[in-house]
Image: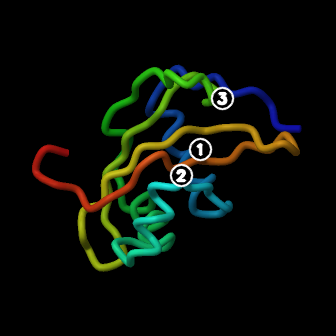
Amino acid sequence: MNEPLDLSEAGEIFPVIRELVVTGNPQCSRKVNEAIDRGELTVRDLKQCMITARGIHKAEKDDLGMALDGRKYFIIGRGSYGQRVYTCGRIFLTPEGHRAYFFITAHEANEKD
């Protein structure tokens, strides 16, 4: 089983999130899966976003209490074709006790993001 995370510093957690997404099997909400099904983005875009992002844009309390550290993270990066991609997600534990990342939302970033 993985060790608990002390995720108090956003600069320290971003490499963990990047690793979970790029090398792991990130999970997606129904909303994100529907966007993928419509061809608006791909899992490759989500992974590329994490590779190109400079860090965490902002972090907020996870009101649903499902995040391992109680926070959800907003990250903006570039997709496979250079488009800006806005994501929000959380780290959680799988039933097997492994850390994984869950995308709550993801879409092409707009000027407000």
Mark closest to the chain's N terminus, 1 or 2? 1
Give, as a three-letter code, the residue at label 2.
Ser
Asked whether 62 or 53 is in front, the reply is: 62
- According to the picture, the residue beneath numbered tag 3 turns out to be 68
Percent x, y of residue 21: 58, 57
- According to the picture, the residue beneath numbered tag 2 turns out to be 29
Q: Quadrant of residue 5?
A: top right
Question: Pointers 1 and 3 in contact (CB under 8 A)?
Answer: no
Give, as a three-letter code, the residue at label 1.
Val
Outermost residue toward the left in this view? 111
Mark closer to the observer (1, 2): 2
Percent x, y of residue 111: 10, 51
Q: Quadrant of the N terminus?
A: top right
Per the image, label 2 sits on a secondary structure element best described as loop
Q: In this view, does 99 lie to the left or right of 59?
A: right
Q: Which residue is drawn at 51% across and 26% down?
A: 71
Q: Is residue 5 above or below residue 31?
A: above
Q: Residue at x 50, y 63 (%)?
A: 33
Mark closest to the chain's N terminus, 1 or 3? 1
Q: In this view, does 101 lie to the left or right of 30?
A: right
Per the image, label 1 sits on a secondary structure element best described as helix
Q: Residues within 10 Å of mark 2 (few under 14, many from 20)?
A: some
* Cα–Cα span, label 1 and label 2: 20 Å
The colour mode here is rainbow
Give, as a three-letter code, the residue at label 3.
Leu
Percent x, y of residue 28: 56, 55
Q: Residue at x 20, y 45 (%)?
A: 113
Q: Residue 16 carries which label?
A: 1
